């Protein structure tokens, strides 16, 4: 792409509205359009943020030749279809997690990016959180030594969330714990084995046919001596919300805090010490650096909106936007690109299949273009 500002359209304006001012302030972007099925809400958000192009029909939005890229923030069952439609319409895609809900959908998205030459990025928050950036910096400076093992967890209580979440297999939404254990060593999953444990409420089981309260998966990394373990729970498990990862190295190890807002721990040999995680706003353009630590609604006229959520997700939102825009501008692959996103997503999909089959090993597909 040329160096002209990239015209961005955001699809889905619940969580998605968090990103509007970040794109508005980023020097590489033009926050061009928004799309929300509810016309009244769409128009209110468009007015509040001064966005001229407001759509209620996604297919109509994709016909706009001025849109360069879409950022999809809709429910998970829509991600694959909407990503494929955008790619086929000639638009680059940034999509919230997960990439898709089936291996075949992941394969189709990878194939479409290869056919079209367009860019796809899954907006995985944890790999741009300040905690991950801190550990990544330690690793790249050699402070961890050789990585020996990685572990991550994502535990959450989804009772009361929208109906499509009810009974969701834990590993079907596993990217927040799979992402960091693959991203730090820049690895790819080769095969997985997963066990399910416990049982959720009987009324939650029929929708997806998944009985497990917790699923825990071992991942073998390809062309590496490394393995990782990830744990996921969604219902009927007592635990404070937690997205975490631990890294065990030959020189130092990092363990995520057990309780939110307490300090994480670094082990040097057998000596532990608590550590304050710094912010990483210095990696960003000045125009969007503040979004790592404060809410996006920083203008008085926007305060009436009901979805003031704060930066959240370890300050990752501006880092995600910056990675996507710089990748487009520099004509390079973002992290994670389509293949990497498919590998991360399919770890969870195949892990649940493994759990349903008593821990059977499941190999990840290669995600190559079909030879039609």
Image (cartoon, rainbow, N blue to C red):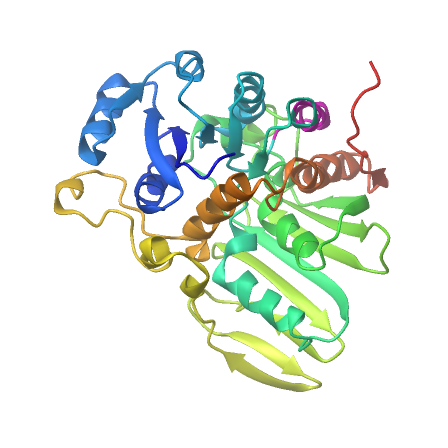
Relative to residue 209, is residue 360 depicted above or below? below
Is residue 238 something that shows in the picture? no
Magenta stretch, residue numbers? 100-112
Q: Residue at x 27, y 40 (%)?
A: 307
Query: What is the x, y in percent for residue 353?
Result: 76, 33
Relative to residue 299, is residue 151 depicted above or below? below
Query: What is the x, y in percent for residue 341?
Result: 65, 39
Is residue 56 something that shows in the picture? yes
Q: Main secondary structure of the magenta part?
A: helix
Task: Reply yes or no: does residue 101 show up in magenta.
Answer: yes
Relative to residue 120, is residue 61 depicted above or below? above
Q: In the picture provided, is 250 more to the left or to the right than 35?
A: right
Q: In the picture provided, is 213 more to the left or to the right than 360?
A: left
Q: Residue at x 57, y 51 (%)?
A: 154
Q: Residue at x 18, y 29 (%)?
A: 47
Nearest the viewer among 122 and 259 is: 122
The quarter of the displayed image where residue 315 is located: bottom left
Which residue of the protein is positioned furthest toward the left in this rendering?
Answer: 300
The quarter of the displayed image where residue 200 is located: top right
Task: Reply yes or no: does residue 60 show up in magenta.
Answer: no
Query: What is the x, y in percent for residue 63?
Result: 43, 12
Query: What is the x, y in percent for residue 300?
Result: 13, 46
């Amino acid at each position: 792409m040329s160096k002209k500002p990239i015209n961005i359209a955001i699809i889905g304006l619940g969580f998605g509205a968090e990103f509007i001012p970040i794109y508005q302030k980023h020097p590489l972007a033009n926050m061009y359009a928004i799309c929300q099925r509810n016309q009244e809400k769409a128009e209110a958000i468009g007015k509040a943020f001064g966005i001229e192009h407001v759509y209620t029909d996604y297919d109509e939005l994709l016909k706009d030749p001025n849109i360069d890229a879409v950022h999809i923030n809709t429910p998970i069952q829509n991600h694959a279809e909407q990503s494929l439609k955008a790619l086929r319409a000639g638009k680059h895609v940034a999509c919230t997690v997960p990439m898709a809900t089936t291996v075949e959908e992941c394969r189709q998205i990878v194939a479409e990016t290869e056919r079209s030459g367009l860019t796809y990025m899954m907006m995985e928050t944890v790999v741009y959180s300040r905690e991950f950036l801190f550990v990544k910096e330690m690793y790249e400076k050699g402070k961890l030594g050789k990585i020996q093992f990685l572990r991550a967890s994502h535990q959450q209580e989804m009772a009361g969330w929208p109906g499509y979440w009810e009974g969701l297999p834990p590993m079907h939404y596993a990217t927040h714990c799979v992402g960091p254990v693959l991203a730090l060593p820049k690895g790819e999953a080769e095969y997985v084995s997963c066990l399910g444990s416990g049982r959720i409420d009987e009324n939650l089981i029929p929708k997806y046919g998944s009985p497990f309260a917790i699923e825990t998966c071992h991942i073998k990394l390809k062309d590496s001596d490394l393995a990782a373990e990830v744990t996921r729970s969604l219902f009927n498990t007592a635990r404070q919300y937690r997205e975490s990862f631990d890294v065990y190295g030959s020189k130092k190890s990092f363990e995520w805090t057990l309780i939110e807002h307490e300090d994480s721990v670094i082990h040097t040999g057998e000596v532990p010490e608590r550590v304050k995680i710094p912010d990483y706003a210095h990696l960003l353009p000045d125009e969007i650096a503040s979004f790592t630590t404060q809410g996006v609604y920083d203008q008085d006229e926007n305060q009436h909106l009901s979805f003031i959520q704060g930066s959240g997700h370890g300050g990752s939102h501006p880092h995600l936007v910056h990675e996507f825009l710089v990748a487009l501008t520099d004509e390079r692959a973002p992290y994670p690109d389509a293949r990497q996103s498919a590998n991360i997503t399919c770890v969870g999909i195949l892990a649940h299949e493994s759990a349903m089959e008593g821990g059977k090993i499941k190999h990840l597909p290669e995600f190559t273009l079909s030879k039609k």
